[in-house]
Image (tube, helix red, strand yellow):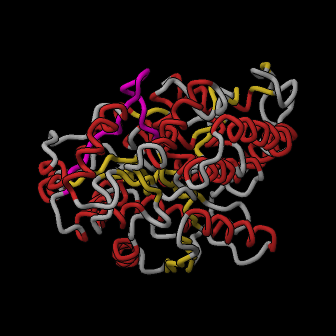
Amino acid sequence: MAMNLDRRLFLSLAGAGAGAAALSACGGPSTGGGTATTAAAAIDFEGVTPAASIDFWSNHPGKSQEVEKATIEKFHAKYPDIKVNLVTAGANYEEIAQKFQTAQAAKSGLPALVVLSDVWWFRYYLNENIIPLDSLIKKLDVKLDDFRTSLVDDYKYDNKQWALPYGRSTPLFYYNKDHFAAAGLPDRAPATWQEFAEWAPKLKASSGAQYAFMYPALAGYAGWTLQNNLWGEGGGWSKDWEITCDSPESVKALQAAQDSVYKDAWAGVSSKESADDFAAGLASATLSSTGSLIGILKSASFNVGVGFLPGGSKETTGVCPTGGAGLGIPSGVSKEQQLAAAMYLQFATEPENTAAFSAATGYMPTRKSADMTAVLAKTPQIKTAMDQLAVTKVQDNARAFLPGADQEMAKAAAKILTQQGDVKSTMTELKTTLEGLYTKDVKPKLKA
């Protein structure tokens, strides 16, 4: 729990300069946070009636459009006076975020409910684009304590709840059981990346696949999944709020990744979606979201295995990041819209509906009381994802809280993994960039 508290309270740290090794303790947020929370505290929904129609913006994480439509139909049956319009607002988290930012700038066309990814929700908090949900949670008697603690706590800051978990995931290690058997390998995920490096030549020699392993597409994935590699070697994008992407441990982890592509030549880098490449048989193993599970199981013509993420030479547990998306309510729409959105948000995250969403996608059931018996009987692999949740680690502050950091991490990873750039110098450049993002985009919104 301490790690969650560190994550949520990082804004109480203000820096003496971008290059400071650690930030000195100061007060809480000012303009970007203080104003928002002060205004938000005054939100009163007493006497407000829900709007007759709202827009729900989604990118349909985990190919969830059909189950989203089904949930909306169930909602309409229960609340016939409220129409929920499902809008495809992007193909991924980045696209939906850009569309939301455009609507914010135009001050028009905003949705009442929007999918917020793990690297976008906090900047919306800083920019006062979303409201805290606490008064709505109280008004609607949302059973907050029934949500999985680690997932709901990801959206807490300043003792307020800024979103609720929706398509929540971890990466999983996916492997081709048939390839592993043909190579004489055990039917499990490797314990460490060092162990997989020993297995990889056997897989390449016997499987007929192009690669033993496929790195996920770097855009949107590099900053997330490479935390696993970094943490396993004792490194990271940051430690607390010190940028550590250029540390010897971090460089060692990324050098090993580069060597797997170029020097040892058993790994490739997906150009679009590693889950699809894996399901097509191009690689014997990959990392991908739990939200890819159902799609992989449907499209693969082989026996699919799933396991925990491998560790490294320094750490073998606590090397898997949480991730995925939540649902938030914009500040720029009417109270009537906000109330109707909260009613749908409550409905969509009820135990029965989160179990259905999990069954359709492979995402985590976000409610403790969700009955997963039927789901697990049909798709037992989901239990691996649920079990791994107990050994996850809160994402590095640099990835989760610096606006634009995820894209910068992806650029640096591309330099290393697709252009064979020098690892140390690339990470040194990235460190400078990340410190600049803090100084420019976060520090001005804090008060000492």
At horizontal 55% and vertical 68% (from top left) the residue drawn is 340
In the figure, 199 relative to 57: above or below?
above
| Horizontal relation, residue 346 to residue 186: left or right | right
Q: Main secondary structure of the magenta part?
A: loop
Picture coordinates of residue 154 (x, y %)? 53, 40
Residue span colored magenta: 304-321
In the figure, 41 relative to 363: above or below?
above
Magenta includes 318? Answer: yes
- Using the image as rendered, state which of residue 110 and residue 312 is in the foreground: 312
At horizontal 78% and vertical 48% (from top left) the residue drawn is 39
Magenta includes 299? Answer: no
Picture coordinates of residue 285 (x, y %)? 31, 52
Which image quarter: residue 186?
Answer: top left
Which image quarter: residue 21?
Answer: top right
| Horizontal relation, residue 76 to residue 237: left or right | left
At horizontal 67% and vertical 62% (from top left) the residue drawn is 330
In the figure, 318 relative to 38: above or below?
above
At horizontal 31% and vertical 38% (from top left) the residue drawn is 196
